Amino acid sequence: MSEIEAKALVIYVVHGHVELIKFLHVHGADITMADQHGATPLHYAVQMCTQHQQQQQAQPDEESNKTEASREDDVVDQLTRLAVLHVVLTRTEIVDSFDQQRRTPLIWAATCGRPNC
C-alpha cells in the first residue's frame, strides 16, 4: 500500500467514511499499516469515538439548549463513529499495536481528551 493510500485510509477513518474504508480494504489497503507516528487506523478510530464522548460530557449546559434535530445529529454522528470503529476492528488482526510512544489503541481511548493525549 502506498503512503497516499495509507493517508487516505486515516482521513476516511477520522471523517467517518465507512464505505470508503471498506472500499480501500477490499482493494488491498493494509488496515494495520502505521503512519509516520506509528499509529494505525484503529488508533484513530478509538480516538474519534472517545473525543466525541468527552466533548459532550464537557458541555452539559449546551445539551439542554439543543434542539431535537441537533440531538439527532449527535446520535447519527456517534453511530457513524462507532460504525467506523466496527469496520476497522473487524478488519484488524492486531488490536494491540504500538505507536512511537508505545501506546496501544486502548491507551489512546483511555487518555484522549486529557493533557498529553
Image (cartoon, helix red, strand yellow):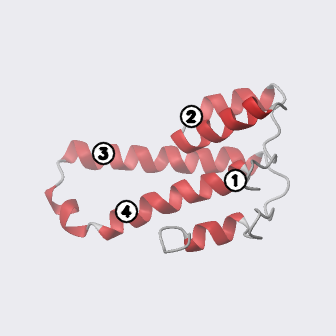
- The 10 Å Cα crowd at callout 4, few under 14, some 14 to 19, many 20 or more, is few
In this view, the mark in front (1 or 3):
1
CA–CA distance in space, label 1 to label 3: 26 Å
Relative horizontal placement of residue 14, taking residue 62 as reference (left or right): right
**The residue under label 3 is which amino acid type?**
Glu
Q: Residue at x 71, y 26 (%)?
A: 23
Relative horizontal placement of residue 8, taking residue 63 as reference (left or right): right
Disc marking residue 104: none
Residue designated by label 1 = 42
Q: Earlier in the sequence, mark 4 or mark 1?
A: 1
Q: Residue at x 59, y 67 (%)?
A: 109
Does the CB distance between marks 4 and 1 fall below 8 Å? no
Picture quarter with the C terminus: bottom right
Residue designated by label 2 = 17
Disc marking residue 72: 3
Q: Earlier in the sequence, mark 2 or mark 4?
A: 2
Q: Secondary structure at mark 2?
A: loop
Does the CB distance between marks 2 and 4 fall below 8 Å? no
Picture quarter with the N terminus: top right
**The residue under label 1 is which amino acid type?**
Leu
Q: Earlier in the sequence, mark 1 or mark 3?
A: 1
Q: Earlier in the sequence, mark 2 or mark 3?
A: 2
Residue designated by label 4 = 55
Q: Earlier in the sequence, mark 1 or mark 2?
A: 2
